[in-house]
Amino acid sequence: MKSYRKELWFDTSNRRQYINITPEVNHCLAESGIQEGLILVNAMHITASVFINDDEQGLHRDFEVWLEKLAPEKPYNQYRHNGYEDNADAHLKRQIMGREVTVAITNGKLDLGPWEQIFYGEYDEKRKKRVLVKIIGE
Amino acid sequence: MKSYRKELWFDTSNRRQYINITPEVNHCLAESGIQEGLILVNAMHITASVFINDDEQGLHRDFEVWLEKLAPEKPYNQYRHNGYEDNADAHLKRQIMGREVTVAITNGKLDLGPWEQIFYGEYDEKRKKRVLVKIIGE
Amino acid sequence: MKSYRKELWFDTSNRRQYINITPEVNHCLAESGIQEGLILVNAMHITASVFINDDEQGLHRDFEVWLEKLAPEKPYNQYRHNGYEDNADAHLKRQIMGREVTVAITNGKLDLGPWEQIFYGEYDEKRKKRVLVKIIGE
């Protein structure tokens, strides 16, 4: 069994933002040389997500409006978590969008459906943040 | 390490529908001959889910009502994604219900709790759609 | 390839409750002796979750209020699932919070970000319940 590990760093310009990280994940897979196995891609921060959906700007605007409806950022004092912080909504949004994806590796490629793209979702921009890529296989 | 891959195809008769795919997943596992490992089962389409919950028709009706409350299909023009398409709600519903499950394999069996059943959830019926089954182990 | 399996048992005193199970998962990993691989931690019951978020009591109170808003427990008769049971809301809450997490193992440690902690989330206390820990690797 072979294994591979890499941290990817992302810096977002908005409090909430979606970044298509499929190219970086593909690069990790090529670097690993693994042909058959599983790849785990997870946010290392608890106010961020890794998820798979459509690379379409209109949908990303819909995510923004929808998540603000389900878990609004403001007023900050509606959340008990917001004593010294203001990011309780980000912890909730990330539960809906998810922490991680596991993707099959087949013949050295990410085994994705035709429209599947991997995204980093940030809900509380503060600083550079990390995504972990771990691959196991042969 | 052994690996196994199969695509399962499903054709739903309603826009939204839940199909218990545990028998097909069990069949894949038997075919693989793998005794110890992990199995990944994921929707290959971004308006569909694979998830684990109860095989109970009342609950599936509750899913329908609940998801329509959290991410209503109509009016279509409430979503920016719905320019040429009408399925923005399906992309949102799938975020709540999830893309994939990873299940342990122990002694050649799916290592599921007493009531755990694996479902394909369709939120935007249009055509035949695929689920990917990938198994790694020994 | 090595594999390891253990069931962890939890007994909650409230209908809804969050338990930090990171120490128990760390204990499993040490017991397994596995240095590189993946660990799957999943609820074996379909009205419970395993998820990763912050070990902060205010946030856990926010989870309680938020999940009750998105999928209220009462009135029981709003759900078709609640014929002989009263836990339809627990099946819905668990879809938002998730069934499982997959975590990388690197150098014999859980490869977690600085604030990531693993939780068992119970939404329908009735009896002792189980979490499955499965590790594969080398």
Image (tube, coloured by chain):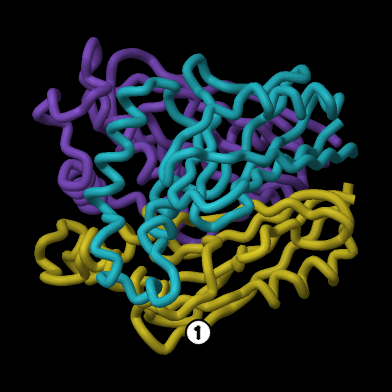
Chain colours: A purple, B yellow, C cyan
- In which quadrant is the N terminus of chain A drawn? top right
Residue A19 % position (x, y): 36, 35
Q: Residue at x 59, y 29 (%)?
A: C21
Which residue type does callout 1 highlight? Asp
Name the chain letter of the residue that bears numbered label 1.
B
| Residue B58 appears in the figure | yes
Q: Residue C34's quadrant in the figure? A: top right
A79 over B12 or under it: above or below:
above
| Residue A57 appears in the figure | no
**Which secondary structure, mark 1?**
loop
Q: Residue at x 77, y 75 (%)?
A: B27
Q: Between B104 and B81, which is closer to the camera in this rendering?
A: B104
Circle 1: is it few (<14), some (14-19), or many (20+) Cα within 10 Å? Answer: some
Q: Residue C4's quadrant in the figure? A: top right
| Residue sticking out furthest to the top | A84
The residue wearing badge 1 is: B11
Q: Residue at x 43, y 54 (%)?
A: C95
